[in-house]
Image (cartoon, rainbow, N blue to C red):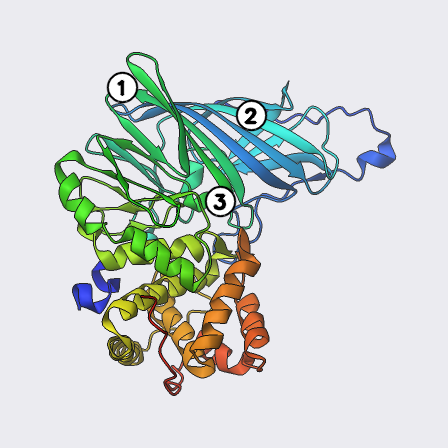
Amino acid sequence: MRRPIWLVWLTIALVACQPIAAPAPSAPAAVLDEWIEGAPGVGDPVFPLLGNGGYDVQHYTIELSVDVMRNEIMGATSIRAEATLPLRSFNLDLLGLTVEEVTVDGAPAHFARNGQELTIVPTAPLAAGALFTTVVTYAGTPAPIRDAHLDFVDQGWNQRNDAIFVVSEPQGAMTWYPVNNHPIDKATYTLRITVEESYIVAANGVLREEIDHGDRRTYTWEMAQPMASYLTTVVIGDFVRITEATSTGVEIRHYFPPQDADRLTQLFAATDEMIAFYSDLIGEYPFDAYGAAVMPFPLGFALETQTLPIFGLDTVMEGVNAHELAHQWFGNAVTLASWDQTWLNEGFATYLQRLWLERKLGRAFLESGMRRYYEMLAAMKTPAPGTVDAQNLFSMSVYERGAWVLHALRLRIGDELFRQFLCTYYARFKDGVASTEDFIALANEVSRQDLTDFLRSWIYDETLPPIPEIGESFPSSD
């Protein structure tokens, strides 16, 4: 996520509910003792109730019919999952909306609601290793989450000015579909959204099909690579689709308000060049498509939703595009393992944004800018980024001191090894999650040095460490 006003690079801005009944399996009593209830959360340090235990989702199929003006949805989400434990019941995260029916493998299941927890009891327990399909049918008006700790954004499904956009980070996915709502459980997605004929729908991945029903139209989007739930999005409104020439084979498609399309096309013209630069630096772009969805009003932030970052008219800047694009590698393909480690997402994206600017403006420009940020962090006594609470998820600590963790590592080990580190980190954890301990261990491995104390001081010490000596610059990719 990008909070642009103070974070933009200095050159840019110096229930319907059935009661739970116990299943009636035919297994012997001794076997019944082995069945458990899936945990209602994964114990995340910041959001302990996000996610659920006992299963691993493979694929979501989200089918929604949307009345944009009324801001109402009705539909069903099908969830293909594997039981990782022998389950007599399990939970999904779903906040608000009215659940009309739940089935597991085609059979009606009992269910109950308690806050964000949707507890499901299948007709028969699920053996560990079993693949099963849950279908939840629901309807209503999705309401975004308003969190005092994240007061710059309404999390989840938003309607504004005859347009809809979804900001799922960090908790908002559960406002519009039932989900195992934690980054450790990535899955592939099919999003099938039906709207009035006058609206355009954009979502994650690749547009596979449009079906014209006369006065309504269905858009089918496929996200073929694993995606964390907080990166899911749907954008609905009056947009034009703009395609950009590509040198990398990545499909580049933007969704712009018609009245701003020409200006925005010019502002995003460097996208293909950025993809080529990051691909050369880190590794091949991880997905099939990329492009911006620009809302026809200011938002105060931009968001790295997978393959389709969301921008407001106030955050359309080359540096912000470089930031959200960098997230596709770090944050999206390689995702944080828990929410107290947001520096792994934001520190990487912030520093890679700087590397794009360094390529254009030179190493001296990068160094002077990083030193100014260092002085600001020291003056403000910015907390260490290693473990943050809800109030600091998207703070200067994770963006700017997080970027300094990477810059310090680069200065300490030199450009060649730093580049090797980026490539190896990406390749090793691609399509999965990584932790700060994974980061430190890999830095030790690549550098063949014990950098544990050095990196821990940058990540965890309240006092900002001294700047290491400056190494060589990256060679130009021109």
The secondary element bearing badge 1 is classed as loop
| Residue depth check, mark 2 versus mark 1: number of the one nearer the observer | 1
**Residue 227, which numbered label?**
3
Q: Earlier in the sequence, mark 2 or mark 3?
A: 2
Q: Residues within 10 Å of mark 1 (few under 14, many from 20)?
A: few
Q: Residue at x 81, y 38 (%)?
A: 33
Which residue is disc 2 drawn over?
135
Dot 2, crowdedness within 10 Å: few (<14), some or many (≥20)? many
Which quarter of the picture shows residue 154? top left
Q: Give the percent coordinates (x, y) of residue 369.
A: 25, 75
As measured in the structure, the alpha-carbon distance from the residue carrying label 2 to the one carrying label 1 is 27 Å
Labels 2 & 1 near each other (Cβ < 8 A)? no
User: Residue 244's quadrant in the figure?
Assistant: top left
Give the percent coordinates (x, y) of residue 237: 25, 30
- Assign the C terminus to one quadrant of the image: bottom left
Inter-mark Cα distance, 1 to 3: 29 Å
| Res. 179 in view | no
Seen in the picture, residue 46 relative to 49 is either above or below; the reply is below
Residue drawn at the location 58% of the way across and 50% of the way down: 42
Q: Nearer the viewer, residue 73 or 17?
A: 73
Residue located 23% across and 71% down the image: 361
**Which of the labelled discs sits on residue 197, or is there none?**
1
